[in-house]
Image (cartoon, helix red, strand yellow):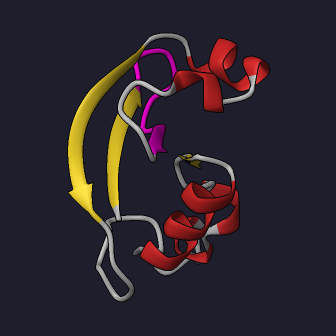
Amino acid sequence: MHAYVYKSLRKDDTYVFLAARDAFDRIPAGVRDALGRLELVLEVDLYPGRRLARADAGTVMEALSTRGFHLQVPPRPDLDPMTEDWGTDA
């Protein structure tokens, strides 16, 4: 499955995968407005087991098949246990 990856110029580290090039109408209006302008950064072939930086290829493929888009947002540091101060620094 071929996908087109766009980055949000308003939201840092936020990307949208689309099943069709420039098919921005697949993204709900509220989400489009929040993301601002989108810039194409990558065309990628997806297949089960493909390694992606922050997403599971199967999850992205499912979203593209059912909704026509997949939204990738930055990880939340409050959910990452490695960002806590564990009090181990001397």
Q: Seen in the image, is 73 located left or right of residue 49?
A: right
Please, is residue 17 above or below residue 80 in the view? above
* Residue at figure coordinates x 22%, y 46% from the top left: 43
* Residue at figure coordinates x 23%, y 34% from the top left: 41
x, y percent for residue 38: 41, 19
Q: Quadrant of residue 79?
A: bottom right
Please, is residue 3 above or below residue 87 in the view? above
Please, is residue 42 above or below residue 22 in the view? below
From the viewer's side, name the closer residue of 17 and 19. Answer: 19
Q: Seen in the image, is 77 located left or right of residue 20?
A: right
Q: Quadrant of residue 59?
A: bottom right
* Residue at figure coordinates x 63%, y 32% from the top left: 26
From the viewer's side, name the closer residue of 31 and 9. Answer: 31
x, y percent for residue 18: 46, 42
Q: Which residues are magenta?
A: 8-18
x, y percent for residue 64: 55, 56
Q: Quadrant of residue 48?
A: bottom left
**Outermost residue toward the bottom?**
49
Q: Seen in the image, is 79 located left or right of residue 75?
A: right
* Residue at figure coordinates x 70%, y 25% from the top left: 31
x, y percent for residue 73: 56, 46
Q: Seen in the image, is 65 located left or right of residue 55?
A: right
From the viewer's side, name the closer residue of 57 and 74. Answer: 57
Image quarter of the C terminus: bottom left
From the viewer's side, name the closer residue of 30 and 18. Answer: 18
Image quarter of the N terminus: bottom left
